Amino acid sequence: MDTVVLGLQWGDEGKGKLCDELAAAHAAVVRFQGGANAGHTVIRDGVKLALHQLPCGALHPGVRSVIAAGCAVDPAALRAEAEDLGLAPDRLTVSARAQVVPPWFRLIDAAEERLREDGAVGTTGRGIGPTYAAKAGRWGITAGELADPGARAARLAAILPWHHRWLAALGLDAPAWPGADELGEWLRPFVADDLVAIAAARAAGAVLFEGQLGLMRDPDRGLQPAATGASVLPPAALVGPTPRVIGVAKPYVTMVGGGGFPTEITGPDADVLRERGDEYGATTGRPRRCGWLDLPALRYAARAAGATHLAMQMKLDGLAALGRMPVCVAYAGWDEARGYPLPHEMARLRPVYEDWGLPGDPLALARRIAAAVGLPLAYAGTGAARGEAVWEPEARL
Ligand code: IMP
């Protein structure tokens, strides 16, 4: 059975660690959206690795990595990452239909953030928004086109005048991509039909779909306009029938970038959670905003993601140091049966807290959270390293 792993909070729930635990039992690990904005942290042999575009199958010999059609491929960054891990085309497929991130999209990303002033999204600056905007506007270039010398020149010639106007409107220089030919040639042996790669892997075993970014960054269900550029949910056509969908959460909430965050902590407690939990962005190194566990938000995210199971990464050092665990069980005056508040309403929410006391046994606490969310618990992570986790026996592969 295929497994989908999705983040159910504002990001950085520990999807990378769970996917790393699961990868070896799968024939392929698939990334289905986003690009170099992801920052999956995996600890291998005591060394902290941050994967950006590659799924964590890349760390497991014998497991194929697939970057599927919905992704935004930054070829220069991908090359660096693949070469770092010694990943050859026999281990990595890049969908010919995936969009390519040309280098000037990082400049556009940064310039548009400056334009938003106080409403800045706090993007990772990796050109994700511009890539999906160009795709929707039909001004993008795909990996298949970049990797085909004839198509490359023709497509770039067709789209560059429009990109030129976009850059000029933002006061930026004309688009220039001196490395396009070389990167296209590097990319070529990796480029194929992702559906074929996934079908071949499925014939050999199960397929793992590795979510990146939390549900709250989904452009449809999340904090629009403080969202990422593409849905954080995998397209149904990619996953096999009735996949297991494991939603991942932590016993508190962290967030990088802008947007509504009802349970944000503004005082020194946030510093304790951040320092003890090493809560700094894996891609940008930014300090993460910290808040208390938000059960209404988690119930909403579980529903929006179609989660069938909950996995809890029990990062408890910070909460243990604080000696208490406030949990938001409702928003005052808000009836959850009406649905979840809209992003522009979130600043007005008044969380109602219960103190769940000193966090004790991680498994018991994970089960309590799962019961409050209304999902069966699959897994409780108990430390950062591979294998530091407890699986509920019926959820183990
Ligand atoms: P973008 O995906 O770079 O356009 O950023 C959109 C929003 O998603 C910003 O608020 C980012 O901070 C957030 N975001 C993007 N990637 C990550 C991640 O890996 N972890 C947590 N937040 C992220």
Image (cartoon, helix red, strand yellow):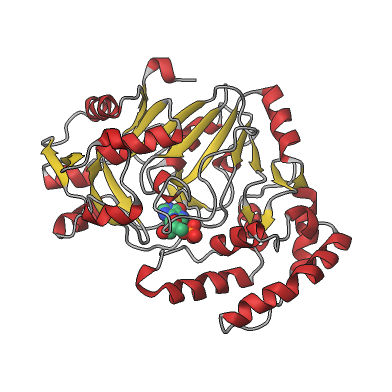
**Residue 29 rendering spot, x and y as whole percentages:** 60, 36
> In terms of depth relative to the viewer, which is nearer, 332 or 182?
332
Residue 138 in view in this figure: yes
> In terms of depth relative to the viewer, which is nearer, 142 or 165?
165
Vertical side of 219 occupied by 116: above or below: below
Vertical side of 131 occupied by 367: above or below: above
Vertical side of 368 occupied by 96: above or below: below
- Give the left or right position of residue 267, taking residue 171 as reference: left
> In terms of depth relative to the viewer, which is nearer, 320 or 200?
200
Ligand number 1: quarter of image = bottom left
At 15% from the left and 46% from the top, the residue drawn is 321
**Residue 46 rendering spot, x and y as whole percentages:** 42, 46
The quarter of the picture where the N terminus appears is: top right
Snapshot quadrant of residue 114: bottom left
At 29% from the left and 27% from the top, the residue drawn is 370
- Give the left or right position of residue 319, taking residue 185 as reference: left
